[in-house]
Image: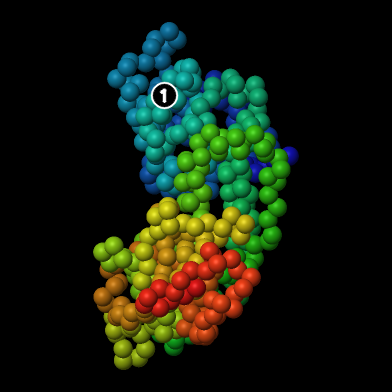
Amino acid sequence: MLDPKLFHGIVVIIDDQLRGAVENIHAIQKQIETVGCHVIGMTTLPTDAQLANLGGASFFIVDWNLVGEPFDEGIAIPDALKARLVAEVIAFLKKLKGVRIAPVFVFTNEPTNVVIEELRKHPDLFIDADPSHILVKSKAEVVEKGIFAVLLEWLQQAPSAYVLKRWELEYERAKNDLFMDFYGRSVYWPLILKQTFEKDDVPPSVALGNLIGRNLLSRMTPFEFELESFDEKLLLGIQANDEKYRETLLSVLEGERFLSAERLHETSVAPGDVFKEGKSYYINIRPECDCIARKGQNQDDVNLYLLKGSKLSSGQLNFQEGYGQLEERDVNTAIFAMKDGSSFSFQFSELQVRPWRDLKDKRIGRLLSPFLTRLQQRYASYLQRPGLPRIPVAAVAAVPAKTIEPVPPNGPKEGP
């Protein structure tokens, strides 16, 4: 059973009726506060500066029509004013998405389909084919069901939201443990490590960030995801739109094996760096310690050891379903879903040595381990592969003649 406490915490309510005596919004606020959550109440949309401080909220409640001043009963909001209010809420929701992805209740007194149609005009914000993080509801419905019951209903249809929220809670716990350990010890440890990194000619900012990341990971406990709570019928949605879910899976797989260039420090050079030059791709396999400029050497002069690669078409993807891997020969390594959903093959037959200055503006990202480690290990095996004498065709008596291929005039092809 999924636990609604996953969304306990700070809740932001943005509703101009908070200043009045309207019961619905106050009833919802009371439901939230009764379970120990803290409510931040706002009667107008937050400024950019205010929004930047709301990144830790568990969920948001936003009134669709933030008029500000109440209209007398029976008097309709002018169309021009309504259009402006809708545009302001849409703009806010887009800004909020850039600060915090969390459930957002949009409350409306209009029919909910009217609001949903407005949101559909912004596919970068709202796609209702899957359960969206924006829940369009009437206040009366939420008061009747209970806001955490409504959240649980939504969560039951969104396993991705559940898994990420569960991970986030463990991440916050581990981060707090990390801060307790490092705040409570010598305040000078970053300076000590900085000196150590500089002695190795390693960019201190890069190395220190990696060190903190590893310390954080070491403090995270094993996860227990209650995925059994989800109805297996949800998987039928994949069959109904398999191409869309394939794209999603490719994006998830890429995230675990490839860092795009904009996420890399510009002074960081490492094995796994991938470059694009024309239609060709190159990957650096030189050991990390050799990718650093030593004393008296300029970083631009550091040579990289590059293997040439190419993007694989769908017809070139020979997938071994039994092993869950792409087929490879001794002379190459294939990386599935490395970049933009595409798979790549890097060849071992020719190693190129080129300086960093020629390639630094052409870097598109970095392949991560264990995929990089596997490529390096396979290349090392390739360099040391022994040559075996050919087996005489006449000696293979147990093999039917039709399966024995003649030797090409120019000799056997390279590799198996």
Residue 349 located left or right of residue 230: left
Depth check: give the residue in front, 411 or 352. Answer: 411
Do we see residue 209 in this rendering?
Answer: no
x 38%, y 44%: residue: 48
Q: Secondary structure at mark 1?
A: helix
Q: Position of residue 63 (x, y in %)?
A: 47, 27
Do we see residue 87 in this rendering?
Answer: yes
Colouring style: rainbow
x 64%, y 34%: residue: 233
Q: Quadrant of residue 228?
A: top right
Q: Position of residue 352 (x, y in %)?
A: 33, 79
Residue farthest to the right, as pictured: 1
Check disc 1: other Cα within 10 Å, few if <14, some if 14-19, many if 20+: few
Residue 4 located left or right of residue 373: right
Q: Position of residue 275 (x, y in %)?
A: 34, 68
Q: How many marks?
A: 1
Residue farthest to the top, as pictured: 74
Looking at the image, residue 83 lies above or below residue 4: above
Q: Position of residue 170 (x, y in %)?
A: 64, 55
Q: Quadrant of residue 138?
A: top right
Residue picked out by circle 1: 117
Q: Give the quadrant of the N terminus.
A: top right
Q: For the residue marked with disc 1, what is the amino acid?
A: Glu
x 71%, y 40%: residue: 229
Depth check: give the residue in front, 359 or 109. Answer: 359
Depth check: give the residue in front, 315 or 78. Answer: 315
Looking at the image, residue 83 lies above or below residue 393: above
